[in-house]
Image: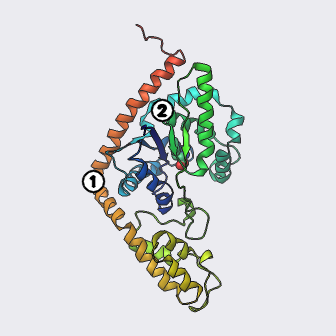
Amino acid sequence: MEKKRILTGDRPTGKLHIGHYFGSLQNRVKLQDMHETFIEVADVQALTDNFNNPEKVKNNVKEIIMDQLSVGIDPNKVTFFLQSMIPEIAELTVFYSNLVTIARLERNPTVKTEIAQKREIFGESVTYGFLGYPVSQAADITAFNATIIPVGEDQLPLIEQCREIVRKFNSIYGETLQEPQAYLGENKRIKGLDGNEKMGKSLGNAIYLSDSEEEISKKVMSAVTDPSRIKKDDPGNPNICMVAYYHNLFSKEEVEAICEECKAGRRGCVACKKQLIKNITEHLAPIREKRCYYEQRPEEVKEILMEGTLKARKEAAITMGKVKEAMKLDYFKEV
Ligand code: TRP
């Protein structure tokens, strides 16, 4: 199989949770052995809607690197890098901004949804930077000549917009950039403890990879169950119970029996929750252990990010050379 290049990333705005774990991190672990992988910590993108909270972005950079290392993403196979330390990405963003209309950005479904969700920050009028973040994301991807982009479904309009930018660039300046493709993988979206379709840091319904047994216990105890079940021997409906939903993920061998017992009214919710707490805790134990290792070695984490960033910069510089040549911005080349 021909080795291709993968690029993906996260905004450092919070620690990673089990939604990320099933939705994207397991996928990254699998892909790291198949293709050359670059993983961006998108701190510049995080600032587009957190410009007034730089502390939050800074603090979460190391958290999301540690989360990824702890689930088995291997720094010897993968290149982790910081977006803000690759000036080529900012340069490309400026060049690409001529190739995108404001109307097209305003029509981007992902941007539209996010603007609606972020009224608190933007009020009636969105910033230039936020509206333009799809352009900057196109720069992230093309700076590394990446063609496989593992993302969640919500990101598809951003990849499509990147493809448009690439086509436009190539048609004007000559064949230079490669069109990337979104990779959805199994793309499981994990529901929140409250039954919300999405587990999210801003929704307060998440179990974090770094949660202690006590925190897991508290959260599972408060998870939404079948509301019509009052007494222990009332028959339950596992289809509307979040505890049954997580048993599906963490108690694979037992889940069938669990649901049968629940439906027959032979299983109390408290015992059911305790069993889930035990299984989640056991599943996350090696992850937490690895996280502890890195928490005690901040220098090692910093080193991983610094080395990766240096390598990433070299790659971005190669692309920059080609882009400038194509755009006739290589003035002093033959001097
Ligand atoms: N927008 C992505 C998110 O919010 C993060 C991201 C930034 C990204 N740059 C990227 C994803 C490049 C894939 C490729 O999750």
Of the 4 image quadrants, the one containing the C terminus is top left
- Quarter of the image for residue 172 reads top right
In the image, residue 235 above or below residue 102? below
Crowd class of label 1 (few under 14; some 14 to 19; many from 20; radius 10 Å): few
Q: Please state which of residues 168 and 301 is positioned toward the viewer in this rendering.
A: 168
Q: Which residue is drawn at 55% across and 31% down?
A: 93
- Amino acid identity at mark 2: Asn
| Count of marks placed on residues | 2
Question: Contact (CB < 8 A) between labels 1 and 2?
Answer: no
Residue 307, given in percent of the width and then of the height, sits at: 32, 39
SS at badge 2: loop
Q: Which residue does the numbered mark 1 point to in the structure image?
A: 297
- Amino acid identity at mark 1: Arg
Q: Which residue is drawn at 30% across and 55% down?
A: 294
Instruction: Answer yes or no: disc 1 within 8 Å of ligand 1.
Output: no
User: Going from the N terminus, do you reach mark 1 or mark 2 first?
Assistant: 2
Q: Is any atom of residue 56 visible in this view? A: yes
SS at badge 1: loop
Instruction: Answer yes or no: disc 2 within 8 Å of ligand 1.
Output: no
Q: Which residue does the numbered mark 2 point to in the structure image?
A: 145
